């Protein structure tokens, strides 16, 4: 027996007993009491701003980011001034990117942005500020519920949970290191 085989055999003999996965309830959405409040607390803790809109997402976005001039919008009902034509170079000097999330996750404040809701893959990473329109009815309790709701989603998508940040260098927090400096979540009923 080689040394490699002896090591692998010892690892197999000493492996822990299998542990069954927990039975997690699934299929819950924004109808659960306190779910949207938990989502809001988590996303705000990550550095995002949350605004409530009474159905008029465009007005809420304008009020949240009033100085934005160069706006790319992939969200229905929110007008943009820059076309999302697939050329990421045209997005280099954006002030704001607006899109809709497919769902939000209460346990960590993450939102699922599928490629179909972005218009351009690079847009949420190039704009200094991103506004995401999220229906309160699509908030689910956990990431398990989120993956269950997404099912066999195909194509590119990304979970976003706050503005870009890192503390890799000298443990100093830097906001906007790899993407947007600010994230606004526009909650709609």
Image (cartoon, rainbow, N blue to C red):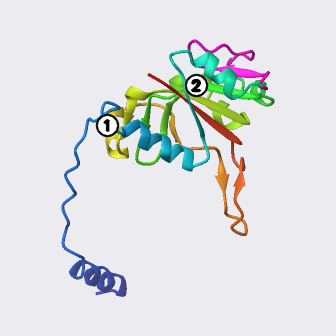
Residue drawn at the location 68% of the way across and 23% of the way down? 63
- Residue 116 lies, in percent from the top left, at 51, 23
Of the 4 image quadrants, the one containing the C terminus is: top left
Q: Is residue 83 magenta?
A: yes
In the image, is 14 to the left or to the right of 40?
left
Dot 2 alpha-carbon crowd within 10 angstroms: few under 14, some 14 to 19, many 20 or more? many
Q: Quadrant of residue 14?
A: bottom left
What residue range appears in magenta? 67-84
Seen in the picture, residue 47 relative to 82 is either above or below; the reply is below
In the image, is 74 to the left or to the right of 148?
right
Q: Which residue is mark 1?
A: 33
- Residue 51 lies, in percent from the top left, at 57, 30
Q: Would residue 151 be seen by someone viewing this image from the given angle?
A: no
- Residue 170 lies, in percent from the top left, at 72, 69
Residue drawn at the location 39% of the way across and 34% of the way down? 139
- Residue 176 lies, in percent from the top left, at 72, 47
Seen in the picture, residue 80 relative to 109 is either above or below; the reply is above
Residue drawn at the location 64% of the way across and 23% of the way down? 61
Seen in the picture, residue 146 relative to 53 is either above or below; the reply is below
Mark nearest the camera among 1 and 2 is: 1
- Mark 1, secondary structure of its residue: loop
Mark on residue 99? 2
- Mark 2, secondary structure of its residue: strand
Mark on residue 18? none
Q: Quadrant of residue 69?
A: top right
In the image, is 2 to the left or to the right of 117?
left
Q: Front-most of 168 and 62?
A: 62
């Amino acid at each position: 027996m080689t040394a490699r085989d002896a090591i692998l055999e010892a690892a197999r003999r000493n492996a822990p007993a299998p542990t069954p996965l927990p039975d997690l309830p699934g299929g819950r959405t924004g109808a659960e009491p306190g779910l949207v409040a938990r989502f809001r607390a988590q996303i705000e803790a990550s550095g995002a701003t949350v605004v409530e809109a009474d159905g008029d997402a465009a007005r809420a976005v304008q009020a949240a980011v009033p100085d934005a001039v160069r706006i790319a919008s992939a969200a229905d009902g929110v007008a943009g001034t820059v076309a999302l034509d697939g050329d990421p170079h045209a997005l280099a000097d954006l002030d704001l990117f607006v899109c809709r999330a497919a769902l939000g996750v209460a346990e960590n404040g993450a939102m699922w942005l599928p490629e179909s809701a972005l218009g351009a893959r690079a847009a949420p990473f190039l704009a200094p500020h991103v506004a995401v329109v999220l229906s309160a009815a699509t908030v689910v309790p956990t990431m398990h519920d989120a993956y269950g709701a997404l099912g066999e989603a195909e194509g590119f998508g990304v979970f976003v949970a706050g503005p870009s940040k890192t503390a890799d260098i000298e443990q100093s927090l830097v906001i906007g290191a790899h993407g947007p400096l600010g994230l606004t979540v526009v909650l709609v009923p």
